[in-house]
Image (tube, rainbow, N blue to C red):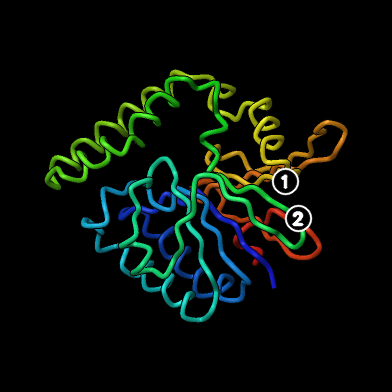
Amino acid sequence: MATLFIADLHLSEDQTALNRQFLAFLQGPASQAEALYILGDLFEAWLGDDLIPDFCQPFIQALHNLHQQGVPVYLQHGNRDFLLGETFCTLSGTQLLDDAVLIDLYGIPTLLMHGDLLCTDDIDYQNMRAQLRNPAWIADFLAKPPAERIAMARALREHSKLASSQKSEQIMDVNPQTVRQTLREHELLQLIHGHTHRPAQHRLDLDGKTAWRHVLPDWQSQPGLLYCDTRGCQLRELASL
């Protein structure tokens, strides 16, 4: 059996083919896994657990079925769905994780992150992230009526698109020194994250030791995952499972 890691699906109502792929994945390969980790941005947007869209109901049921079958499903917030809360987790049988979590992955201590906190060169994004994750901002946003939340989310998304179009690829990627410092702080040699949409397995020299940074693929470009078992970790395309 294997442990599977996915991220950056960005599911939305108009992504019907992708939605079907995800359901097939949950009912197929995921059902044979030892555990499933979703490291952020499962959804393109999330406006609060009191506004669960109808198109999400099959996902909630399929995730709950995995839980009932004995496959634990762990969920991290992304930058698009950081308002996912305990109601969603209760309904889906998932377990919400902190922004940075240490797990034992077949004997290798491993750090899990969405990945946006590693993009420290993008100062504008980090400032906006701090504002949006402020508990006072979140409470104020969730208290607003649905129409106002929808309008605010649309405006934030347009601002994000415009800002991203004006930034270099390097700025929007992780900062190598931040990666190394993060691994040092946690005294680890393995990191798994998403967010950047640049799937790869990076071998690093960390103070004379070999460290690994596994970057998960986004499902908009080429659906895939990180497949880990006692032999190690491999990036695999969904179609190959």
How crowded pointer 1 is (Cα within 10 Å; few <14, some 14-19, many 20+) is rated as many
Q: Amino acid at mark 2?
A: Ile
Quadrant housing residue 149: top left
Tag 2 near tag 1, CB within 8 Å: yes
Residue at screen point 36% across, 37% down? 133
Residue 225 image offset from top left, x and y in percent: 61, 56
* Name of the residue lying farthest toward the right: 208
Query: Which residue was labeled with disc 2?
Result: 108
Point out the image quarter for the C terminus: bottom right
Helix, strand or loop at mark 2? strand
Residue at screen point 67% across, 35% down? 185
Of 90 and 168, nearer the camera is 90
Residue at screen point 64% across, 44% down? 215
Q: Amino acid at mark 1?
A: Gln
87 on left or right of 142: right
Residue 206 image offset from top left, x and y in percent: 80, 33
User: Tag on residue 241?
Assistant: none
Q: Is residue 38 above or below residue 126?
A: below
Quadrant housing residue 205: top right
* Name of the residue lying farthest toward the bottom: 69
Query: Which residue was labeled with disc 1?
Result: 190
Q: Is residue 43 above or below residue 70?
A: above
Helix, strand or loop at mark 1? strand
Looking at the image, tell me whether mark 2 or mark 1 is earlier in sequence order. 2
Point out the image quarter for the N terminus: bottom right
Q: CA distance from mark 2 to mark 1?
A: 8 Å
